[in-house]
């Protein structure tokens, strides 16, 4: 496989000025992620997982090194092009505050399509299809506060995939969920990865999530300590890399 | 997209209703404050016009030079024909002759011996003629507390406060001890037929109101008048108009060497009133500016807090791919709508309160017990053209600027930090 990787970082360094010196959040991280992967950045709290995801998602810029995402150099991207990259190609799922509380489920999922300027009929079709995929089409008119934590995360997944992005970045998506909901959410993601070919990159220290991963990248103090291809212990059987 | 953002704004009361109410309250306060200060100023003018020297006044040059001392020995003579001329030449003004005098009022007991005495500030105007302009300018009929207005010579009115102090009731006769135009002591008896309260403490403390003809007779001032006052028929003092009127009047007599020739002056020139009015205008201008500033800071801060509270939402919207400029624009549009709505409603409420204060007033006489300024003891607002606009400064401009400046944080901060604030 010599196709251009979806994500390629080289010696990625991120430091934060703290007190007298610099805190090294990412320490020369060089990674490649190919299209269709279902991979996770694993490590204890404070190991730099979120920082890495934010740089890959063009929400942040590295202090040194380079990150190429979908052919774009994140470190030199202006905020307009970064917004366009996120809007068209990257879906985010966060740990909390994933949904805009004043909007209905439908409207939350519709928001990225509004930004893309799609016509109303097209938006409706796509939103309903995306909600269908996560099994929440019947909750389209609900408000976020009427949903369970698992349902909220499934709406967030549906919003992340509604624009058919190449990449979904999920930062500790199960941290606030109980076991049953976590498994349901992960099942949904595995299925979308298989059906749509969407690349998923997680940040997690949750054993349940780790059980679904096909690749496990371990960060310790901002540096890559291990990068292994693993066989999922959970998830749908027989899934193969596309 | 606009509909989408609008829906969010309307549904989130913390973002729409609450800020609008804050703006509304701030703007209403500003408008009322402005109206109140302008009202105080215009009250000062009104009271001084009615009880002092009208909007313009005509005196002899000699009298004018020492007007504070009420020098009746220098009064105008032949006042009635001059009054008629003024009425013909300037029909937009009501013209009236007045005599002021100082004296003692002596209240006799049953045996005719002095029971009590008090200094009195006398004012004589034409009270008996039903067509007298003083029924409109001084309007004693509206100020009557007890008794009735004089209907015949020899009848007088006392201020209610003075009457109470002297224990004089309508029907009783009192004696005035004063000085004639020629400097000799004089006494005259009057029957008090009514008492007055004008609502101007400096007047109500010790005034006596006589008919002009009676005063002329008592003070030996046949055909004389201390001052002829002109009062705009609509009651509004217009400085430029009054100044032009006075300049015209005085220019026609510039060549006259007579020290007793009449000279006209405007309300601003009376008894240092110009400085007082300027001071009042400066003080109220400064207070209004200060108030607008304070309200602006408050509303600015409210705008600031409102957007800080929403950093989580902004982070999420940026992560989903909204462009920073678009986000900033929507923030400004919201602030503009809230500022505009709050300002319009606040101005409406403020004008309503100011209007009530203008029409009804608020009694502040206890605060004015020792005031010597001619100022009404009823606090009144006045709505001016500026009242309609003043609230928009803090309401619209400050709210908008507050949002604009807090929103700059969206650009300044790393996008990642905005979304990091999503984490707990
Ligand atoms: N904006 C920031 N300023 C200073 N330090 C930060 C900032 N963001 C993250 N850090 C630090 O960088 C390190 C990595 O953080 P993060 O990427 O959030 O770790 P993780 O997601 O693995 O818990 C931590 O020590 C954290 O305290
Ligand atoms: Mg993290």
Image (tube, rainbow, N blue to C red):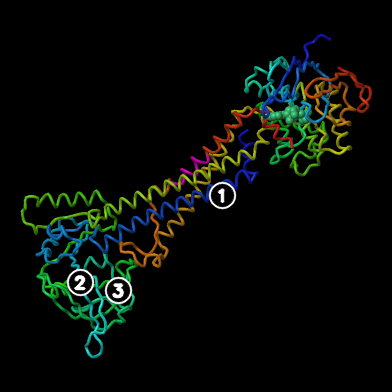
* Disc 3: CA contacts within 10 A as few (<14), some (14-19) or many (>=20): many
The residue tagged with tag 2: helix, strand or loop?
A: loop
Look at mark 2 in the image and give the residue it sits on: B129
Q: Nearer the viewer, mark 3 or mark 1?
A: 3
User: How far apart are the two marked residues, 3 and 1, measured between alpha carbons?
Assistant: 47 Å
The residue tagged with tag 1: helix, strand or loop?
A: helix
Q: Are marks 3 and 1 on the same chain?
A: yes
User: How far apart are the two marked residues, 2 and 3, measured between alpha carbons?
Assistant: 21 Å
Q: Nearer the viewer, mark 2 or mark 1?
A: 1
x, y percent for residue B36? 41, 55
Asked if disc 2 and disc 1 are in contact, CB closer than 8 Å, the reply is no
Q: Are marks 2 and 1 on the same chain?
A: yes
B370 left or right of A2 in image: left
Q: Residue at x 25, y 55 (%)?
A: B272
Tell me the subunit letter for badge 2: B
x, y percent for residue A186? 86, 30
Residue B369 versus residue B208: which sits nearer the camera?
Answer: B369
Residue A17 visible? The answer is: yes
The label number, if any, that marks residue A172 in the structure image = none
Above or below residue B216? Residue B349 is above
Look at mark 1 in the image and give the residue it sits on: B21
Q: Are marks 2 and 3 on the same chain?
A: yes
Q: Quadrant of ligand 1?
A: top right
């Amino acid at each position: 496989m010599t196709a251009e990787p979806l994500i390629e970082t080289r010696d990625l360094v991120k430091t934060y000025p703290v007190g007298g010196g610099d805190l090294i959040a990412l320490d020369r991280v060089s990674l490649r992620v190919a299209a269709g992967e279902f991979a996770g950045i694993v490590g204890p709290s404070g190991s730099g997982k979120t920082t890495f995801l934010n740089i890959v998602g063009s929400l942040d810029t590295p202090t040194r090194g380079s990150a190429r995402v979908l052919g774009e150099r994140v470190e030199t991207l202006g905020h307009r092009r970064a917004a366009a990259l996120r809007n068209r190609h990257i879906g985010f799922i966060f740990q909390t505050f994933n949904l805009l509380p004043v909007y209905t489920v439908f409207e939350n999922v519709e928001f990225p399509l509004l930004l893309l300027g799609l016509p109303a009929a097209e938006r409706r079709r796509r939103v309903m299809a995306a909600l269908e995929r996560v099994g929440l089409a019947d909750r389209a008119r609900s408000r976020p506060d009427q949903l369970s934590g698992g349902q909220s995360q499934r709406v967030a997944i549906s919003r992340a995939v509604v624009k058919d992005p190449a990449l979904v970045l999920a930062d500790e998506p199960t941290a606030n969920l109980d076991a049953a909901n976590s498994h349901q959410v992960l099942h949904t993601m595995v299925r979308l990865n298989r059906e749509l070919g969407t690349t998923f990159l997680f940040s997690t220290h949750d054993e349940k999530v780790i059980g679904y991963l096909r690749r496990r990248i371990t960060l310790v103090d901002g540096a890559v300590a291990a990068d292994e291809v693993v066989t999922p212990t959970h998830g749908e059987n027989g899934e193969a890399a596309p | 997209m606009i509909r989408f953002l609008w829906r969010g704004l309307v549904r989130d009361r913390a973002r729409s209703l609450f800020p609008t109410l804050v703006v509304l309250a701030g703007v209403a306060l500003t408008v009322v404050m402005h109206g109140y200060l302008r009202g105080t100023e215009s009250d000062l003018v009104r009271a001084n016009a009615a009880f002092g020297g009208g909007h313009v006044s005509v005196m002899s040059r000699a009298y004018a030079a020492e007007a504070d001392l009420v020098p009746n020995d220098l009064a105008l003579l032949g006042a009635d024909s001059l009054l008629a001329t003024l009425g013909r030449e300037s029909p937009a003004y009501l013209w009236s002759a007045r005599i002021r005098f100082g004296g003692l009022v002596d209240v006799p007991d049953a045996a005719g011996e002095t029971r009590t005495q008090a200094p009195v500030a006398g004012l004589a105007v034409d009270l008996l003629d039903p067509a007298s302009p003083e029924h409109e300018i001084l309007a004693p009929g509206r100020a009557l507390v007890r008794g009735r207005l004089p209907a015949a010579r020899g009848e007088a009115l006392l201020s209610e406060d003075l009457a109470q102090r002297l224990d004089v009731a309508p029907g009783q006769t009192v004696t005035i001890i004063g000085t004639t135009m020629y400097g000799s002591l004089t006494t005259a008896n009057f029957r008090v037929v009514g008492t007055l309260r004008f609502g101007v403490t400096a007047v109500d403390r010790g005034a006596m109101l006589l008919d002009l003809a009676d005063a002329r007779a008592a003070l030996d001032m046949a055909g004389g008048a201390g001052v002829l006052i002109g009062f705009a028929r609509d009651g509004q003092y217009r400085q430029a108009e009054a100044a032009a009127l006075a300049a015209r009047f005085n220019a026609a007599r510039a060549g006259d060497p007579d020290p007793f020739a009449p000279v006209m002056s405007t309300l601003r020139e009376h008894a240092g009133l110009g400085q007082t009015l300027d001071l009042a205008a400066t003080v109220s201008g400064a207070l209004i500016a200060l108030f607008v500033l304070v309200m602006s800071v408050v509303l600015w801060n409210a705008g600031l807090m409102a957007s800080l509270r929403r950093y989580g939402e902004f982070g999420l919207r940026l992560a989903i791919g909204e462009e920073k400029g678009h986000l900033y624009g929507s923030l400004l549009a919201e602030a503009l709508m809230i500022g505009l709505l709050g300002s319009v409603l606040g101005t409406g409420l403020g004008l309503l309160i100011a209007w009530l204060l203008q029409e009804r007033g608020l009694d502040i006489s206890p605060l004015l017990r020792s005031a010597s300024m001619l100022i009404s003891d009823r606090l009144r607002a006045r709505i001016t053209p500026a009242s309609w606009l003043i609230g928009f400064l803090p309401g619209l401009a400050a709210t908008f600027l507050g949002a604009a400046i807090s929103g700059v944080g969206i650009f300044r901060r790393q996008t990642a930090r905005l979304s990091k604030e999503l984490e707990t």
